[in-house]
Amino acid sequence: MSARRETAFEKLGNILGFVAAYVVGPDPAGRGVPAELVPAIHEMRRTYTTRRADMDPALLHRLGLFDYLRRRLAIAGTPEDCLEQARAARAAGAENLMLTVSLAADPERTVELFGREVLPAPRRG
């Protein structure tokens, strides 16, 4: 999370690739991925690496997967974006969320913003 959406999304592709490879696994169609994105998911699984020096943050953009995976698997962006996404997850039935800031542009600021701007808000509204 960041005050600027672009800053928050800058490194998001790396963690999305990791999470997507685990969540959608070898059968993306069986996990609800739209048919037109299945070939791109297979290509992502074939080329994604967890080696930090070899990570390609633009991979998901090139494959046309970034926006789809961001909407499906992440809470990211500005505090307002994150609040909207957390509320959508709650409305869809999520009771718990697992969050990481390991690849955030500024992890300490991310935690501070999330704690101040997002966590209290679902209880308020």
Image (cartoon, helix red, strand yellow):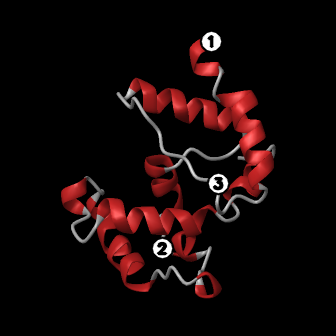
- Kind of residue indicated by mark 1: Arg
Taking the image as shown, residue 1 lies to the left or right of residue 32, namely right
Q: Which residue is tagged 3?
A: 101
Taking the image as shown, residue 124 lies to the left or right of residue 2, namely left
- Kind of residue indicated by mark 2: Leu
Q: Is residue 92 above or below residue 102?
A: above
Q: Residues within 10 Å of mark 3 (few under 14, many from 20)?
A: some
- Kind of residue indicated by mark 3: Val
Marker count (numbered): 3
Q: Which residue is tagged 1?
A: 124
Between the residue at mark 1 and the residue at mark 2, the CA separation in whole angstroms equals 39 Å
Point 65% across, 21% down: residue: 120
**Mark 2: secondary structure:** loop
Taking the image as shown, residue 32 lies to the left or right of residue 45, namely left
Q: Residues within 10 Å of mark 1 (few under 14, many from 20)?
A: few
Q: Earlier in the sequence, mark 1 or mark 2?
A: 2
Point 44% across, 33% down: residue: 89
Residue 32, how many percent across, how many down? Answer: 25, 52
User: In which quarter of the view is residue 24 placed?
Assistant: bottom left
Q: Earlier in the sequence, mark 3 or mark 2?
A: 2
Of the residues tagged 1 and 2, which is closer to the observer?
Answer: 1
Point 59% across, 81% down: residue: 55
Residue 93, how many percent across, how many down? Answer: 35, 27
Q: Which residue is tagged 2?
A: 63
Q: Are marks 1 and 3 in contact (CB under 8 Å)?
A: no
